[in-house]
Amino acid sequence: MSVLTIAGSPARQSRSTALLEHLSELLEAWGIATRAVRLRDLPADDLIEGRIQSPAARIVRAKVDVAQAIIVATPVYKASLSGGLKALLDLLPENAFAGKTVLPVATGGSNAHLLVLEYGLKPVLSALGARHILSGIYATDEDVGFGEDGAIRIAAPLQERLQESAERLTEGLLRVDSLSSVRRLEIASGTERVRA
């Protein structure tokens, strides 16, 4: 099982990226491999010009292809997802997220932008073929921030929500993996049947 995290923040010190790293640590502690794509690591020209055949875009697509689940995180900019994240997602083919469990994550200054998950991020994920989108995680400045030493600070209620979301993601992966195993067995034994 593998999970790909996609960080949509261009900033070096990013609350949304820090939440992705925290989720990755939780998953890896449970034996689930994670890989990462970070907006800030892609060449700006590839993003601005939509270079879908660039080496960086091909690497991103390859990582998406092999992942069983995707966690996408974005800061809220002007009441929506980051433009850089949208440019990154535009490098992916239609249906790139088909058959994958997807967990959306967003960080904003206040609860005023809570609906960015439902009306900004989830429609884009659906356009990429995602059909199994988990309830998202939205965090404010009160929930997550950085101390004077630069260390991430995550409030206890948010830590609980992250734990629950990681568990739901893991359960979804196990369910999909189990169904895939049954299908492989049916094919191997010649008992595969048409499903309505």
Image (cartoon, rainbow, N blue to C red):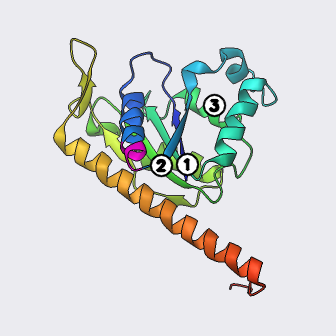
Within 10 Å of the Cα at label 3, are there few (<14), some (14-19), or many (20+) other Cα atoms? many
Whole-percent x, y for residue 71 in the image: 49, 44
Q: Which mark is residue 2?
A: 1
Label 2, label 1: how many angstroms apart (C-alpha)? 6 Å
Instruction: Give the x, y percent position of residue 169.
Output: 44, 56
Mark 2 and mark 1 residues within 8 Å of each other at the beta carbon: yes
Disc 2 crowd, CA 10 A, few/some/many (<14, 14-19, 20+): some
Per the image, the residue denoted by label 3 is 88
Residue in view at x 21 percent, y 12 percent: 148
Quadrant the C terminus occupies? bottom right
Write down the region rendered in magenta.
26-30
Considering the numbered disc 1 on the image, is that residue within a helix, a strand or a loop?
Answer: strand
Label 3, label 2: how many angstroms apart (C-alpha)?
25 Å
Q: Are marks 3 and 2 in contact (CB under 8 Å)?
A: no
At x 55%, y 70%, the residue is: 178
Earlier residue among tags 2 and 1: 1
Q: Nearer the viewer, residue 12 or 88?
A: 12
Q: Using the image, determine if residue 153 lies above or below residue 64.
A: above
Residue 74, above or below 176:
above
Q: Disc 3 on helix, strand or loop?
A: helix
Amino acid on which the number 1 mark rests in the picture: Ser
Question: Mark 1: few, some, or many residues within 10 Å (few <14, many ≥20)?
Answer: some
Q: Establish if 70 lies above or below 80.
A: below
Q: Is residue 162 magenta?
A: no
Tag 3 or tag 1, which sits nearer the N-term? 1
How far apart are labels 1 and 3 at the CA level? 20 Å
Which residue is labeled 2 in the image?
32
Q: Nearer the viewer, residue 141 or 38?
A: 38
Q: Is residue 54 left or right of residue 111?
A: right
Of mark 3 and mark 2, the one earlier in the sequence is 2
Queried whether the magenta region covers residue 29, the answer comes back as yes
Residue 116 in sight here: no
